[in-house]
Amino acid sequence: MGRIKTLMIKKVANELFESVEGFGEDFEKNKKLLKNTMPSKKVRNKVAGGITKLAKKKRQKEHGKQKGRPREQEED
């Protein structure tokens, strides 16, 4: 086995995430969807992890990052 290139994984994960419906934040589900398309288990797991990361990043971007509760204004 050779080295798995990080840029290749990111590129493939991004292309699959944008072109194929059904991918989401669940790593196991993403891994099963990739079962017949990836050449090896190691590559499949890396790509599924990349897709999961993209899905979570997309959700955070859509909902906006909110840390903690918003502060209430005091009225006089």
Image: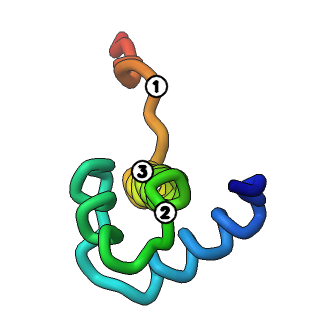
For the point 77% across and 59% down, which residue is it?
Answer: 5
Residue 72 at x, y = what percent? 35, 19
Asked whether, in this view, residue 30 is left or right of residue 14, the answer is left
**Mark 2 to mark 1 CA distance (whole Å):** 39 Å
Residue indicated by mark 1:
67
For the point 77% across and 64% down, which residue is it?
Answer: 7
Task: Give the camera-side residue of 74 and 15.
Answer: 15
Residue 9 at x, y = what percent? 64, 64
Asked whether, in this view, residue 2 is left or right of residue 72, the answer is right
Q: Residues within 10 Å of mark 3 (few under 14, many from 20)?
A: some
The amino acid at mark 2 is Ser
Q: Residues within 10 Å of mark 1 (few under 14, many from 20)?
A: few
Residue indicated by mark 3:
56
Q: Residues within 10 Å of mark 2 (few under 14, many from 20)?
A: few
Colouring rule applied to residues: rainbow
**Residue 40: which numbered mark, if any?**
2
Residue 67 at x, y = what percent? 46, 25
The amino acid at mark 1 is Lys
- Of circles 1 and 3, which is in front? 3
**Mark 1 to mark 3 CA distance (whole Å):** 16 Å
- Of circles 2 and 1, which is in front? 2
